[in-house]
Image (spheres, rainbow, N blue to C red):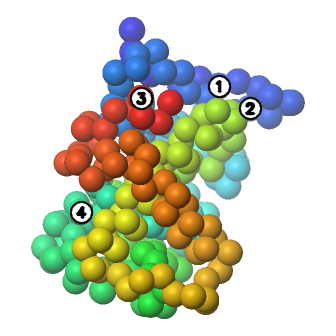
Amino acid sequence: MSKLEVYQTSENGIVKLGLKVWDRTASLADLLECWQPLCDDETIFKAYGQGHHAACKGCPNNCCNTAYVIPDLISFRKMAANLHISEPQFVQDWFEPDKLALGLLKLKANPCIFLQEGICSIYPLRSLICRFYICTELTPDTEQLIYFIAWSGAAATQIYARQQGYLPAPAASGYTSFDRFFIELADACQDLPGVKAFFAADDYRDIPLEYFL
């Protein structure tokens, strides 16, 4: 039996995706392996896809054009290594300077700095928030799990960058409501096992999914 299973269900006439965890020893890598095929599964309803049943690849409504991306810590480290630059240089060159001044990490966007000719140039290294987003409805418990994982990884990056001195102390003002939400989230979650797991992990296979269940 597989450790994880993605299934479709209907709630109030809306088709949604759900996730069942059959084996609590599953890792975050197991979840990603299970999730990746959904991107190009044309049987799954996608709200912004052409005809609503299409592969993410080649989608004309590319979510990378407007995405607000704070990479998880594993992705952050691998992106810098792939670019052959130091982490401080990565922060200075690839993240939005106005957000850095506020003590916040956000990849340059509109479109994403890694989007080239409509294609993600770091697809195998992309962040969790990008990996999980497939513009379809999820069951409430699955949505909660997915976002808990993605934001735990992003919070780990924010905490790590601050600890390493890559970021100034948070500013007193100048935040959007979302900026403020994320800063407060990172502060509130820094001692959670799932957030701490990102610091010790070299890859997603090193992070037990059980921390988020």
Q: Identify the mark nearer the N-term, 4 or 3.
A: 4
Q: How far apart are marks 2 and 4 (CA)?
A: 36 Å
Q: In this view, does 159 lie to the left or right of 165?
A: right
The x and y percentages for residue 87 are: 21, 74
Residue labelled with disc 1: 8
Residue neighbourhood size for the residue with mark 4, other residues' Cα within 10 Å, grouped as few (<14), some (14–19), many (≥20):
some
Seen as rendered, the residue at the extreme left is: 84
Residue labelled with disc 2: 15
Q: Distance between the residues labelled 2 and 3?
A: 27 Å
Residue shown at the point (62%, 67%) measured from the top left: 181
Q: Identify the mark nearer the N-term, 4 or 1.
A: 1
The amino acid on which the numbered mark 3 sits, given as a three-letter code, is: Glu
Q: Identify the mark nearer the N-term, 2 or 3.
A: 2
Residue shown at the point (48%, 82%) measured from the top left: 170
Question: Could you say whether the residue bearing mark 2 is in a helix, strand or loop?
Answer: strand
Residue neighbourhood size for the residue with mark 1, other residues' Cα within 10 Å, grouped as few (<14), some (14–19), many (≥20):
few
Quarter of the rendering containing residue 65: bottom right
The amino acid on which the numbered mark 2 sits, given as a three-letter code, is: Val
Do labels 1 and 2 touch, CB within 8 Å? yes
Which circle, 4 or 3, is nearer the viewer?
3
Front residue of this view, candidates 149 and 18: 149
Q: Which numbered dot is residue 77?
A: 4
Q: Which numbered dot is residue 210?
A: 3
Do labels 2 and 4 touch, CB within 8 Å? no
